[in-house]
Amino acid sequence: MKRVQILLGLAAVGIATGGWLGLNAPPDALQGEYSRIINVHVPSSWLAFLAFGVTAFGSIAWLIRRKPKWDRLAASSAEIGVLFTGIALVTGMIWGHAVWGRAWDWGDPRLASTAVMFFVYLGYLALRATIDDPTVRARRSALLGAIAVVQVPLVYFSVNLWRSLHQTQSIRPDGSTMPDEMLRAMLINVIAFTILYVALLYARMGVAKAESEADQRGASAERVKPPLVDEVRDV
Amino acid sequence: MTPLVELVGAGVSLGGRVILDSVDFSLGPGQVAGVSGPNGSGKTTLLRAIASLTRIDAGDGMLLGADLRSDEVYPVRASVAFIGHIPALIGTLSLAENLRHVVRLRGGDEARIRRVLDVVGLGEAVSVRADSSSFGTQRRLEVARTLLTDPRLLLLDEAFSGLDSAAQSLVDALIERTVGNGGGVVMVSHDPGHLRDRTDIQYRIEDGRVVETA
Amino acid sequence: MTPLVELVGAGVSLGGRVILDSVDFSLGPGQVAGVSGPNGSGKTTLLRAIASLTRIDAGDGMLLGADLRSDEVYPVRASVAFIGHIPALIGTLSLAENLRHVVRLRGGDEARIRRVLDVVGLGEAVSVRADSSSFGTQRRLEVARTLLTDPRLLLLDEAFSGLDSAAQSLVDALIERTVGNGGGVVMVSHDPGHLRDRTDIQYRIEDGRVVETA
Amino acid sequence: MTLWRQALEIARVDLRVERHVGEILRVIIPFGIISLIVFPLAMGAQASSVARFGPAIFWALAVLFGMQVALRQSASDSQTRRDLYALLGVDPAARFAGRVLSGTFLMVVFMLALLGSMILLYGPSLSGQETFAALVASGLVSIGLTELGTLAGEVTSGLRNRTALASLIIAPLAVPLVVGASQTVEAVTQGTGILPWVMLLAAVDLALAVAGVGLARPLDEATR
Amino acid sequence: MTLWRQALEIARVDLRVERHVGEILRVIIPFGIISLIVFPLAMGAQASSVARFGPAIFWALAVLFGMQVALRQSASDSQTRRDLYALLGVDPAARFAGRVLSGTFLMVVFMLALLGSMILLYGPSLSGQETFAALVASGLVSIGLTELGTLAGEVTSGLRNRTALASLIIAPLAVPLVVGASQTVEAVTQGTGILPWVMLLAAVDLALAVAGVGLARPLDEATR
Ligand code: HEM
Ligand SMILES: Nc1ncnc2c1ncn2[C@@H]1O[C@H](COP(=O)(O)OP(=O)(O)OP(=O)(O)O)[C@@H](O)[C@H]1O
Ligand SMILES: Nc1ncnc2c1ncn2[C@@H]1O[C@H](COP(=O)(O)OP(=O)(O)OP(=O)(O)O)[C@@H](O)[C@H]1O
Ligand SMILES: [Mg+2]
Ligand SMILES: [Mg+2]
């Protein structure tokens, strides 16, 4: 059986258990059923960071080694990262809608900086989509990937510094007041999601490889041929 | 038999300078006119004036029956083809897309595009971006464009430059075809050889004046 | 006597396509090499690779003692002059301003600018904007730029096109001077005549491969 | 008829519809949203009161994007390209119309993304009617601003330094547009009729369209 | 030394070119001012409170429009031009520095125009100190934005719809600048120290400068 399938299987099992536990754990006193969203929200938030970290790693590795696989790693991880950041944003907004009564709260820096991070990597992907030449694409996105990773903490820092001057009406000190069962479920989900991420990463990289080979074949067909002068009259 | 192009004492000034000074020029159907002269003498400006791309501000001019100094030129412009010093393509579009754009704007049969591309030898390079294809390839694409629009007046400003020998005969075929259909050709070249055996009449320009007609 | 340029099995790919494939090329001091081949065969790419403007991604290459695949090229680039298909000028600057920009960037004596402009016959057109001067004028300005930088390696990509006969002999003088100073010249042309009586060695390229060396 | 066919074709190529529209959307929508995020961050302590500014910020950003259209335009329209079009029998009016079409398309996309995100992020208290009014207004403003942008582009690229003033004259015309737009929404809030405002916007759009088409030839001539 | 001489020369020529083309001063500034005007108008009822938010709005708009200034600059860098510079022995780092110099100059002009109009239009109660802080911040923001614009311009050079793409890439990176700038002024108002914010801005500028110079060569390679 292929590595990807094994990983996917593991992830499925993990998420099933995590989900089951999460659904049966006693709901949070304050938030009721909505607190269960944490089982998706927190794992995806964590994966966002992991994925973008890997993108940075791939980018730098490419700059040093210049091997296509590092470019594929960076790109694939960025795509998955954007996906999970999106999930974190959406689940977060749903959750917020439920517990704060509004989807977005400018009082929590984490929100703004997450959103910004989300767009940094959307930009990264948009750049890739615009470049046809594989080498140029690899070079430029590797540089952007490297710049981005310096910039994510910078945004976090600045936005937090920004908030710190103003009275924060914080969501929660931390998850500690969560019921233990809920916390356990969440941790299992975090692990399961991480396995899922690795599986998706492998899969996506495989596809990317196939794509680039297809491009190669397509491109190499193109050449300029001698003209058919005699036919000029009748076209 | 009315001439395709007729300039009488035509003058052009650009940037406050007189570039063309009382030029007389005439081209009849089926004729090929050659234009030669030193750099900066006004050859390109003459072609642009004939094509109504640069307005004449002295004398009179007719292009395919339209007064060059009036709005009559708008409708006739579409029957003029111009191959200039630098290929006029949209760099971010592929070769095929460039031609499709032309056909759709001008009206015509998109099916011909493939044929024409084969004729100019670009049948297998259609999906290359124009600005990442070689200079000569871009030149060939301009020839292809002209083949698609088959014009009544063909203006060639050193159209042979950048083309390999095979592609150069392509331009010759283009000239023949235009002339064959009763159109006219004006070609600029620095190579006396090029002009000698192709032209019916030759104009020599030196700083903005026609100094010799043969 | 080390060669000025040496390519061994050099390859270049662009847009995911192999453009140059295991090319061997060598140019010694005082030599003039000619390059010919059909449109799109890779001549310009070869010149760009030699000038380190396009990186070779296979084989090895040396340019004026610098490894083409390393950062050693940065210092030597300034001794290379390239006249390409399309004039490389800043259109919104005047002819004189363009040259001054060059001199100031590269270091050198601004006083020479006037002299050089006279030599290329642009002494009176100095204040015309580059993009509103004629194509041949722009070509001449490139010759002027090369005269100012007097390079050790001169790369000419159809440098004669667009120039009138007088200006063409200017390019010949440029070639002689470069060779005279122990430099080297690589010239691309579609005109066998141009190459025959100017070059010591000729390369013919087809489809990115050197198919013939004479 | 031809003029329209040409305008549509130019718009198509402007957007390179078949391959790159997706790409454009992927880029423009996020940009709009980020611009929204910038404002509260700039407001510091009062960030929480951003809800009240939602609409104002929305319209200000509309102007920003209108200007981008102007610059996009002047960038893509080189003299060579103009000449090419001229000899393909493209009427300058068709070129203007085409640019406005593609520009408006981008602009509308931008505005919709902006409106949606604005409501989510700032949570302003917009009634259904107000939202509707905002949508109508956005549409009309998009057209108007794009027409302005395109004209401004034509003027700066075409006449170059000959008339530095021209674009300074054109740009302020954006004011009535955006005022009209914001007032349309205000009117709903205040319960007064929105018709006069909608009419104003429509009138400006029309006037600009007429101006654009009418000036197309003279502007084109001015570059020759 | 050479690197500086080259940078200065490139900046000089950039400004010269801008004087010929003049898009930045002729299009971006007017549009920037318009969106300032639009703001209170669009706020309708709360228009009165515009004075309080003047600075915030200023910063947001300054950054958003400033991005465009930064981009227009780097747009002028065609491949032909890069090649020309390369064979003149211009180090990519010098090109970066030169662009940043000229860009910063234009940006400062833009910022001053906007700041002036903001004070005129909104009449915010800015103390001398606050105005000073604003000026300092503007300076630092101008540098940072230009560095960003130049970097983004390099990364996107020669690509389709590069302006939109570059805008998207810059916008998030500009967040620290907005925050820093607005907070610098706010800090004065609140009597808390402005140092941390000035430091933040300076840090960002420095980081970008290092990145720009350090990545100049790889970035240049990336376009070959
Ligand atoms: C990647 C960044 C993020 C991380 C690391 C993160 C992490 C967390 C964690 C650990 C919790 C559970 C602990 C707690 O309840 O406070 C939580 C709760 C929450 N998050 Fe996030 N989150 C992120 C982004 C977001 C975003 C973007 C939103 C909204 C759009 C959001 C909305 C919420 C809400 C509403 C809660 C529940 C608040 C409460 O319990 O009262 N989060 N987040
Ligand atoms: N940036 C690029 N991206 C992709 N392909 C490119 C690029 N530049 C050149 N090519 C391809 O490389 C091939 C060789 O181009 P090159 O300009 O070297 O040809 P050439 O021999 O100079 O032709 P010509 O005689 O027309 O000048 C062409 O098929 C062209 O499409
Ligand atoms: N837009 C313009 N503004 C000002 N002067 C111009 C403009 N276009 C051309 N000129 C001037 O007109 C003169 C003739 O230019 P033109 O291009 O017609 O010369 P040409 O005969 O084609 O030269 P070449 O052989 O170099 O192509 C040149 O001196 C040029 O400087
Ligand atoms: Mg000419
Ligand atoms: Mg070539």
Image: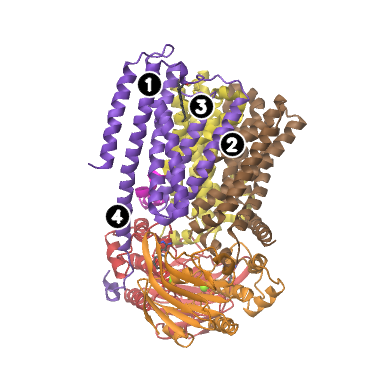
Chain colours: A purple, B red, C orange, D yellow, E brown
Rendered view: D80 above or below B181 = above
Are discs 4 and 2 less than 8 Å apart at CB? no
Give the spatial CA distance, label 4 vs label 2. 42 Å
Q: Amino acid at mark 3?
A: Thr
Q: Amino acid at mark 2?
A: Pro
Residue E131 coordinates in the image, percent (x, y): 73, 34
Q: Is residue E127 left or right of residue B42?
A: right
Q: Secondary structure at mark 3?
A: helix
Give the quadrant of residue E191: top right
Per the image, the residue denoted by label 3 is D184
Per the image, the residue denoted by label 1 is A184
Give the spatial CA distance, label 1 vs label 4. 45 Å
Magenta segment boundaries in residue numbering: D1-23
Q: Nearer the viewer, residue A181 or A44?
A: A181
Per the image, the residue denoted by label 2 is E176
Q: Secondary structure at mark 1?
A: helix
Rendered view: E101 above or below A76 = below
